[in-house]
Structures are given as structure tokens and as C-alpha cells.
Image: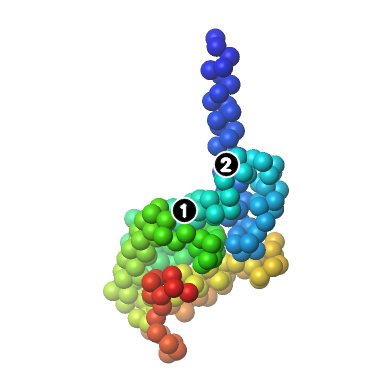
Amino acid sequence: MDRKCCVIPRLRADASRNRDRIVAAARELLVEYGAEVPLDEVARRAGVGNATVYRHFADRGELMLQVTLSVMERIQEQADTAVAEEPDAFQALRRFVLGAAEERIGALCSMLSDAFNRAHPEVVESRNRLERTTEDILDRARRSGQLRADVAVGDLMVAITQLSRPLPGTACANADRFVHRHLLIFLDGLQAPARSELPGTAVTFQELQRV
């Protein structure tokens, strides 16, 4: 048997695992520290050397792009599953919100950085698809009479992001134990009939992108 045939697939699998570990580490650190997290810290959290990070990602921008696409894909899967498996419209919304938090939606804050290329074709495609699906989830809940009428996608995304991140700069190891609890409080506040009048107007996805 040719030994090379046995070695090459193993090396490729190792490289793929390293790449996945780097993306996963960057996702967690973006939630904890924001877009300026040092790449050295990403390497340390992933358990790889700095050279391994740069072997997979030419620079910070490329890593942030791949993390963003990965998070949006995972959140999209959560949305599709919620719509497919939950006949109750508000329960689908509830499941999506909790699922998006588990997928570390806070990592998408890197999209607000001036250095991030929001016009990248893959980003635009993923963002538009996620926007359409989330709008559909909200519309279903609204038509069922269970969702208050004065909230939009932007309100939802900002709230999930803020409630699923630790306090800035703390990297609080126990923050996750509060996330589920606080998101359920938030979801209760979304239900109709509304118990208070919200100031301002509902935030759309387009307005959120201009922040």
C-alpha cells in the first residue's frame, strides 16, 4: 500500500479541524471582547500556533469574514428549523431567539466595524436570506396575534445580541447562565397585548446596518 495515500487525508483532516477550531475560538472571543480581539489570543484559545492561524487566514479581515459567514449560516439553520418544526408562530419565534443566542449572534457585531467589508457578495447573500427568514418568523407571530405590532427585525437582533453578551471587557465565565433567563423575560415583553408604549419607531434591518 502506498503510504502517501494514507498520510495525505489525515493531514487534510487535521488542517480542517484546526481551521474549525480557529473559527470557533474567534467566534467566542468576538462575543467576549469585540472585533479588536488580538489574533494571538485567538490562536491561544484555539490551541494552535500563530503560524497556523495565518496559514488558514491571510489577515484579520479574512478571519472575521469567515466567522461572520459561519455564524450567519448557523443562525439561518436555527431559523429554518424553528419554522419547519414549530406550528405555533410565537413558539417558533421563541425557539429562533434562543437558538440564535446559542450560536453566538453577538459575534456579528464585527460587521459594524469600519474595517469589515459588508458589501462582500457572500455576506450580502447570507444577510439577505437571514433577513427574509427572520421577517417571516415575525410576520407569522404578528398575524397570529401573539406578537406586539411595534417591533421589527432590528429591535429583535439588537436585543438578542445585547442580552447574549457578557459585560464589556469582563469575559464573564458564568454569563451563559443568565442568558436564557433574560431572553425569556425579553420574549415575554414581545407578546401581545403590549403593556407599554415604546418610544421612537420600530428598527428595521436596513436601519440596523447603518448604525
The earlier-in-sequence mark between 2 and 1 is 2
Q: Which amino acid type is shown beneath numbered disc 1?
A: Leu
Quarter of the rendering containing residue 201: bottom left
Q: 61 above or below 199?
A: above
| Residue at horizontal 68 percent and vertical 44 percent from the top | 50
Q: Which mark identifies residue 56?
A: 2
| Residue at horizontal 36 percent and vertical 56 percent from the top | 125
Q: Which amino acid type is shown beneath numbered disc 2?
A: His
| Residue at horizontal 40 percent and vertical 53 percent from the top | 122
Asked whether 141 or 61 is in front, the reply is 61
Q: Position of residue 126 (x, y in %)?
A: 39, 56
Q: Which mark identifies residue 69?
A: 1
| Numbered disc 2: secondary structure | helix
Alpha-carbon span between mark 2 and mark 1: 16 Å
Q: 166 above or below 48?
A: below
Q: 44 above or below 2?
A: below
